[in-house]
Amino acid sequence: MEGAQRKSTLDFFRARKLVFVSVDLAQVKADRVLPWVEETTHPHYAYVRLHGRNPNYAKAGSTTEGHHHDYTPKELEEILPRLRALEKEVKDVHVTLNNHAEDFAPKAAIVLKRLLGQPTLLAPPPRPGHQEELFG
């Protein structure tokens, strides 16, 4: 995704109205690590995948190992201007968190939604010493 190859790839997507997927990963030197591409190729939609910034991503032996990263609020704040830039170009920006190890993705989603000023639906925490009702 550099130079002429980047341009021809994005032109290919635009000509066919395909959505190019922007990816947030640790920026390490490896063939399988794409840089963040802050461009839209579809007139209405942008799609962003947050895979985590695990510095050992390229050396990971499994997907779970590669995506083992718990985004900090500061890292998510760094992503906001990128999302806002895409938002100026298209109607909808879809964001997927794919740092699925442990509970990293839902935690990051909640923080990101709050940073974006979007409502979050959180279940109340379980009451200590009480079994929660299964059927309301």
Image (cartoon, rainbow, N blue to C red):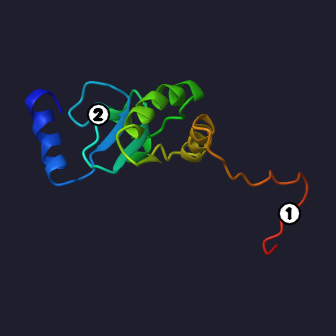
Crowd band around label 2 with a 10 angstrom C-alpha radius: few (<14), some (14–19), many (20+): some
* Label drawn at residue 29: none
Q: Secondary structure at mark 1?
A: loop
Identify the mark nearer the N-term, 2 or 1. Answer: 2
Residue 82 figure quarter: top left
Please report the residue visible at 43 percent of the width from the left and 31 percent of the height from the top.
54
* Label drawn at residue 131: 1
Left or right for 89, reference 84? left
Mark nearest the camera among 2 and 1 is 2
Q: CA distance from mark 2 to mark 1?
A: 47 Å
Disc 2 marks a residue whose amino acid type is Val
Image location (x, y in percent) of residue 53: 43, 31
Q: Quadrant of the C terminus?
A: bottom right
Please report the residue visible at 66 percent of the width from the left and 47 percent of the height from the top.
119
Residue 104 figure quarter: top right
Residue 61 figure quarter: top left
Closest to the observer: 90 or 121? Answer: 90
Q: Is residue 114 above or below residue 126?
A: above
Image location (x, y in percent) of residue 131: 86, 63
Q: Is residue 65 above or below residue 131?
A: above
Q: Is residue 13 above or below residue 81?
A: below
Image location (x, y in percent) of residue 78: 48, 25
Disc 1 marks a residue whose amino acid type is Gln
Image location (x, y in percent) of residue 41: 24, 45
Closest to the observer: 38 or 124? Answer: 38
Please report the residue visible at 21 percent of the width from the left and 53 percent of the height from the top.
17
* Label drawn at residue 37: 2
Closest to the observer: 57 or 16? Answer: 16
Left or right for 74, reference 27? right
Residue at the far bottom: name it.
135
